[in-house]
Image: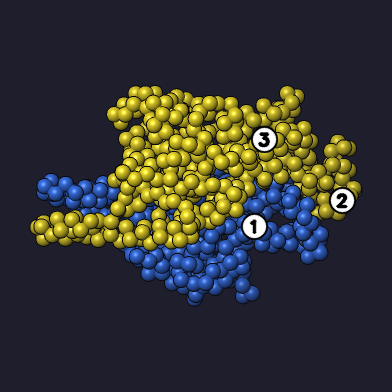
Chain colours: A yellow, B blue
Amino acid sequence: MSTTALSPALAGKRVLICVGSGGVGKTTAAAALALRASVDGRSSMVCTIDPARRLANSLGLTALGNAETRVPATALEPLGVHPRASLYAMMLDMKQTWDELITRVAPPEQRERILSNRFYQSLSTALAGSQEYISMEKLWELRRSSNYELIVLDTPPTAHALDFLDAPNRVLDFLDNDAAKWLLTPALKAGKLGMSLFNRGGYVMRGLAKFTGTEMLQELSNFMLAISSLNEGFRERARGVRQLLEDPNTGFVLVTSPHPERMDEAIHFHKMLKQHRMEVVSLVVNRVHPMPTEALWADAATLTPSRRAKVEETLREQQIMAEQDRTGIAQLQAACPGVPIVQVPRFAMDVHDISALWRTGRYLVGDETLG
Amino acid sequence: MAGLLDKRLWIVSGKGGVGKSTVAAALALRSARAGKRTLVCEVNTQERVSRFLERPEAGPEVAQLEQNLWAVNVRPQEAMREYGLMVLRFETLYKTVFENRLVRQFLRFIPSLQELVLLGKIMFHLQEKLPDGRWRFDTVIMDAPATGHAISFLSVPQVLIQTVPPGPMAREAQKMRDLLVDPAVTAAVLVALPEEMPVNEALELHAALRDKVSLRTHAAVLNQSFPERFTEADLEALGGHPELLAVAQAHHDRAAQAVLAGTKLERNLHAPVYPVPRLFTPEFGRKAIEQVMEHLEPLVTGAA
């Protein structure tokens, strides 16, 4: 029995963050890792972002919400294993987490003003990077306020790797924006925007207003004013998040599928993580097609001609898919030298019950291997 | 059923990783072959269409790939510049305002502005005319972002109309919206795989486009479908070969999933579903795109 790089990480890290493009199986990988760690004796929490209820169901929960929920022991019964530590799960509701954060950091008299502002609405739901930011913020909060030995974070399906790592900076820029201050401060002081059109930013402001409309600038200045009291708190938290991401007890698990396009993104992602000095514990290549064995071909040769033809065609197709996957994985390995790669096979059906999660975990830690 | 060739703007979307760009490339090739001057627009992404068609990358400026076929990768910075120049009219004014470092930083935070200029550039090309009065492009194909992003991207005109005071932005948004909701101009093609999540996302996307954008789904493409191969009798006969049975069963399950997915899509979208079989080619290039194109023939021409 072999072990993978994920095995010591599950035993030793305090935080694992699953990253990768959309649709590659991050949520499954995150849940499988936390499940495995709890069975092996470390109390664990998986924090996912999957909007589907399926993960919740597979963990024996009717629904997952924005609160930590203990996975009932009965859910694990079909596995025939007895977890030696507790397993918790939660599903991050982005909007609610933002609202909670504001409620926590804003002075009471400012809360309503912020929560109802249009710019806040777009910050908490639509601003690129805000989902990534809030998921890391939640991670930091969980790490600080709870005693789980391991927290596994699933991350939002990011369009670009850069959005993810740049998220804290972008959100901080938003909250503490020199440009906005420079342009709007005279307006803030005077209590109305019209003033600043004749002030230091005047020429520029008039051009901008032509572009966006004056009302929009007015509303933005209101928002800036309302949140200016929060900046120090946000900055401090952002520093905390960054420290957590660079902590030696934190590791990244980069999940991908063997599809060439996904591979390109994984390679790019890996480069970004390296540049930010963040540790990639392992690359997980999900849904790999296994190569049909010689024995299968030999067995097929004994079938009646029409069945043999059908089976051999299927094997040929599998072989092509397996070869494509192999080529992709070799390219991935060449592009990310020194990073261990773990392969998880494509299971016959979609992964969405506890046994399939468990089985995925067995491949992740190396109890079972492909090829 | 009207074919896509009757429409001018073809919007391709769906869950990430389902093959949107593959379908967009195949449709673009077919449109160009029908003699339509065709522009395929990718939206701020790693360019794929030009690569699939084995042509050099187009980049942020419209570039001709081959006869009747042009491509562009619509990126925020260039689109913002074009838009800014359009609104402010003067290069010097544009420079003063938009090339101010602080202003650039500031503009990143105006909600939907980036989407507005990206969509605006695509809609601009849709309305662009040649000196002789003909459309510069007969067909514009938008390889749109994936589900969630696509919804917010395509809702931008509607959202702006509701929130922005009258002015240049509002006028632009109104023009864009009128084109997007006109079924004589625009057709949305949703791409899915025969798996639960991509199908569910296609249904969500369909509902959101209908409710938020007033955009009707023209058709769905069920990509990478496995055709049925093994009969029940075949599977029974393989009983004595457990490993081969597993291989056959897996294929059989995937084929069954494709049938189920197709039925679910058709029933909920009230639109035709066109399956494209999983291709088994070692290289995914132009040849593969041409194969996909053949399977999409009835979608493009409207022939049964």
Would residue B104 be found to the left or right of residue A72 on screen? right
- Name the mark on residue A202: 2
Q: Nearer the viewer, residue B296 or A190?
A: A190
In the rendered image, the quadrant that contains the N terminus of chain B is bottom left
Q: Residue at x 45, y 36 (%)?
A: A11
- Viewer-closest of B213 and A21: A21
Vertical placement of residue A123 versus B275, above or below: above
Task: Read off the residue under disc 3.
Answer: A237
Both labels 2 and 3 in a single chain = yes
- The percent position of residue A197, horizontal first and vertical second, equals 87, 48
On screen, A106 above or below B64? above
User: Is label 3 on the same chain as label 1?
Assistant: no
Q: Position of residue B202 (x, y in %)?
A: 43, 46
* Location of residue B189 by image quarter: bottom left
Front residue (pair B102, A201): B102
Helix, strand or loop at mark 3 = helix
Amino acid bearing label 2: Gly
Please name the amino acid that badge 3 sits on.
Arg
The residue tagged with tag 2: helix, strand or loop? helix
Mark 3 → mark 1, Cα distance in angstroms: 30 Å
Q: Chain of mark 3?
A: A
The residue shown at (19%, 49%) is B243
Secondary-structure class at tag 1: helix
Whether label 3 touches label 1, CB < 8 Å = no
In the rendered image, residues at marks 2 and 1 fall on the same chain: no
Residue under numbered circle 1 = B76
